[in-house]
Amino acid sequence: MKVHSERPPGSDEPGVIRRFVESRLIGNFDSETFSEAWKKKFSHAPTWCDADMSLQQINRGKARGNRIALYARAFFQLWLYRIGCFVQTYAWSTILISMVLYTLCLGGLKNVVIETDLVKLWVSEGGRLNEEMNYLASVRNTAQRVKREAAGARRGPELPKENGLGGGFQVVIQTPSYEGENVLTKEALQRHTKLMQEIANYEVDMFNEKWTLSDICFKPPGPSFNSGPLAGIMSKLLDKIIPCIWITPVDCYWDGAKALGPNPPLNLGPEVTSFISSLPQGNVTWKNLNPTSVIKEVGQLFDLGPIGNFFERAGIDGAYLDRPCIDPLEEECPKSAPNYFDKCASLKKFNEWNLAKSLEEQVRIYSKLLFRSILFKTFPCASSR
């Protein structure tokens, strides 16, 4: 027996659209064919069990509910039931058609390309970052072409033959914490630099060894030197100091050298630093190293072949020493930085300006102890008097 909707007297008559929807979705099942299990489920969760019957109860005034949600559930329940009946009636035809469609889909597997390079998912084609990634490869091709065309009997050092950015380089992408945030501010770039340092100094204990990023990252191969008294020293020095390749906005600043290390810093001793004056005293890192000056000084003493020309073509120059600092007031900011702030000269000018005023107009510091603590922390060149 099919149960059709009965409306209580005095209720509002449904519109045309509602009558059309209910004529298609309500009264499609016979309640006499329902099992005891269905009746038990319907008593606990009627709307989820049978939306059709729930709508009938609402139309008869015995229940209340969200008609739009029940219409959607009744639609899906009705068509899933009809699809199930069709599959049961034409089982073999359904299996055959499904296998044919599945076989057609298998034909497209030969054109599937599995992308394992995560960077290609982030870097757009034709952008500036993509151009920088391919820059080293273009320089290599140019250098090899010049080398083939150049005539010379003496065999110089070999230029790197690998693609320096062959998918193994490190890309650090910083996204804003909230919508509309500017990631190119001073604070955001400093957070970016700190994150790079944490990544570079992170250690993992495995196989009774301590591993860092510099042990597994991609590094451009160092050039080979001609035989000479400093060939071995220069080769070992370059092997230790050649950094991992990072592609990050911080690399445009001097602060990008903080994560390059080497960690721990190199200490070549007073003998080497006194012999090569362009090497920084004490610890040698990319924060204070000028590789072009070192190569030029060593090239005046020994024959390095075309290695000096290689540095010049690569545009290394002063490495990070000639790049601006994110914070010009940082103590380690080099004097060669374009935005270097000379604290001592500024203090001298301030004193001259202040002393030129009358006693009533001069800037006075009421807490002398506080003034000295701030002065020596900010201006280490100041003398205690």
Image (cartoon, rainbow, N blue to C red):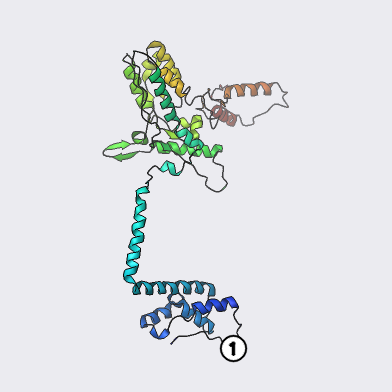
Does the rendering let one see residue 281? Answer: no
Q: Closest to the observer: 101 or 378?
A: 101
Query: Which three-letter amino acid code belongs to the residue tagged 1?
Result: Pro
Quarter residue 45 falls in: bottom left
In the rendered image, residue 325, in percent from the top left (x then y), is placed at 53, 30
In the rendered image, residue 329, in percent from the top left (x then y), is placed at 55, 29
Quarter residue 121 falls in: top left
Q: Residue furthest top?
A: 301
Could you tell whether 354 is left or right of 205 in the image?
Answer: right
Does the rendering let one see residue 361? Answer: yes
Q: Closest to the observer: 170 or 81?
A: 81
Above or below: residue 291 compared with residue 186:
above
Quadrant containing the C terminus in the rendered view: top right
| Label 1 CA crowd tier, 10 Å (few <14, some 14–19, many 20+) | few
Above or below: residue 321 compared with residue 250:
above
Above or below: residue 6 compared with residue 276:
below
Q: Closest to the observer: 352 or 112?
A: 112
In the rendered image, residue 126, in percent from the top left (x then y), is placed at 50, 38
Q: Going 43% across and 24% down the picture, which residue do you hit?
A: 142
Tag 1 residue = 9
In the rendered image, residue 161, in percent from the top left (x then y), is placed at 36, 27
Above or below: residue 8 compared with residue 227:
below
Q: Secondary structure at mark 1?
A: loop
Could you tell whether 328 is left or right of 153 in the image?
Answer: right
